[in-house]
Amino acid sequence: MYESNHLCALLARHAVLTPDHVFAHRPGLSDVTYAELFAGAERTASALVAKGLAPGDRVAVQVEKSIAAIQLYIGTVLAGGVFLPLNTGYTANEVGYFLGDATPRIVVCDPAREGEIAGLSEAHCLTLAADGSGSLSEALPEVAGFEPVPRTADDLAAILYTSGTTGRSKGAMLSHANLASNSETLREYWRFTRDDILIHALPIFHTHGLFVATNVALFAGASTVFLPRFDPETIIEAMPSATAIMGVPTFYTRLLQDPRLTPELATNMRLFISGSAPMLVDTHEKWLTRTGHRVLERYGMTETNMSTSNPYDGERRMGTVGLPLPGVELRVTENGAEVATGEIGVIEVRGPNVFQGYWQMPEKTAEELGDDGWFITGDLATRDAEGYVTIVGRAKDLIISGGFNVYPKEIESVIDDLPGVVESAVIGVPHPDFGEAVVAVVVPEGAPDEDAITTELSRGLAKFKQPKRVIFVDALPRNTMGKVQKKELRETYGELFNG
């Protein structure tokens, strides 16, 4: 029944082949089989169509992680819609921009937020709570069974927003082929099978948790230990019976704090994967010492899914993000020309994983995605003689804190509008737990008031964007052209969280 839709066929393959195999082990709750997962997804697809969803319509989703939320993702794809997940930490003001830009047909939010979300757009508003209750569940038909809406490889399956340094968020358009090809490549490259049990503690509103962890498990027919959030205690308990985990560096630094982390605990584990932010070599070394396993670090972004990975078989080099994945071309350039081995340049990638462009932003798309298919990532890196890629920085001052992208310009705009502030510069500095911490350097007007600034920011910004420190200075460093020298600020405050 799924042959008309390649992505749907791959997602649903094991619902047909091994329907009674467990997809999700949920601590304290019942297991969910592949048959049950897809029966719910089909019922969800029917409900979305009944609410007016047509092929190509967007479904914006800001809900807590749950099996019902996974079914909503799959159901949207089955119905021919375009899935638009939103960070659960976004404020109503932030959500309003996405809804205005993407113009979804349907928006699904937590019941507790219905009052503030429903009035932000003309979309039909449904609710879904973490326990599966809400108006969406009430709209589900009793009987499963849904014929997937035929879509081509180039039709959109999802839009994920990734903010730009100019402050305006960009919707990265991902096709059925983009998601299917990358997930299948990762399944093969990382050797996932139906015998695996993946600890899934990532959020499902971005690429890592949804299109890497979830899709790879589904494509392989693997089981998951499906956790609503990262919890070291639960992960420690799950590790003896699990085989793999995907996480961000923060996962590993916090697990290293537990004395129970030993080679014996990790005996059954075959693979530890880290991404979304650089992992310090020190963390790599400590993990190897404590568990006997080398963490496999990889590299990707919203626009490209995964592009590189350290090898499953072969040398995993600490501090690098490995080699280009099969089918992905990668080059390091300066002013459009490839640099010599070992020199710093901007990463460009080309392959079936690369997105279709930015939603309603043709000029921005043309700037970064060439007619020849090469995408300019904006990430700075070197590549050695064996082809291993090492990320050395980000051309646009992107901060990655705890695996989440934070864009300084957005925060600076909010701070600069506050009373008592002359100007600000937001930077990322090394942090032993989060990889990078957001720090605001502020020139005050009159007496500094850190509490006033942090209070105001907490009202308008998601928690992961809020600065961990606010530093007051008399003036920001500038060059002769008047440009703020953020590199100098990062050097000045680089040891802020060291010890």
Image (cartoon, helix red, strand yellow):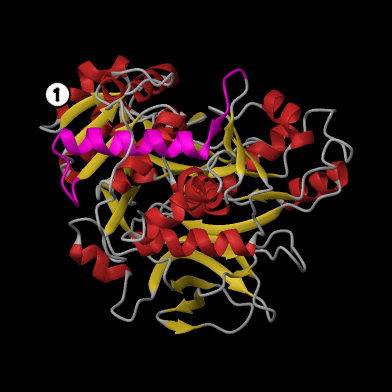
User: Residue furthest toward the left?
Assistant: 122
Number of on-image labels: 1
Asked if 83 appears above or below 389 in the picture, the reply is above
Q: Is residue 5 above or below residue 245?
A: below
**Residue 231 in the image, given as x and y percentages of width and height:** 63, 26
Residue 372 left/right relative to 32: left
Q: Position of residue 432 (x, y in %)?
A: 67, 38
Q: Nearer the viewer, residue 439 or 158?
A: 158
429 versus 236 height, above or below: below
**Secondary element at tag 1:** helix
Residue on which disc 1 sits: 119
Q: Is residue 307 visible?
A: no
Locate the C terminus by quadrant.
Answer: top right
Q: Please give the name of the residue rendered at 45% of the width and 72% of the height, measured from the top-left corner.
A: 349
The residue at the point 18 percent across, 51 percent down is 55
Q: Is residue 149 visible?
A: yes
User: In the image, what residue occupies the spot 53% across and 82% down?
Assistant: 339
Q: Amino acid at mark 1?
A: Gly
Query: Residues in magenta?
Result: 28-57
Q: Residues within 10 Å of mark 1 (few under 14, many from 20)?
A: few
**For this rendering, which residue is in front, 431 or 71?**
71
Identify which residue, 460 or 8, lies in the foreground: 8
Residue 194 percent across, percent down from the top left: 64, 49
Near-viewer residue (485 or 314): 314
The answer to which image quadrant residue 150 occupies is bottom left
**What residue lies at 69% left-to-right and 48% top-to-bottom?**
195
x and y percentages locating residue 376 in the rendered image:
39, 69
Q: Is residue 345 above or below residue 190?
A: below
Q: Is residue 128 magenta?
A: no
* Residue 19 shown left or right of residue 424 in the figure: right
The reply to whether the magenta stretch includes residue 38 is: yes
Decide if residue 474 is on the left or right side of residue 193: left
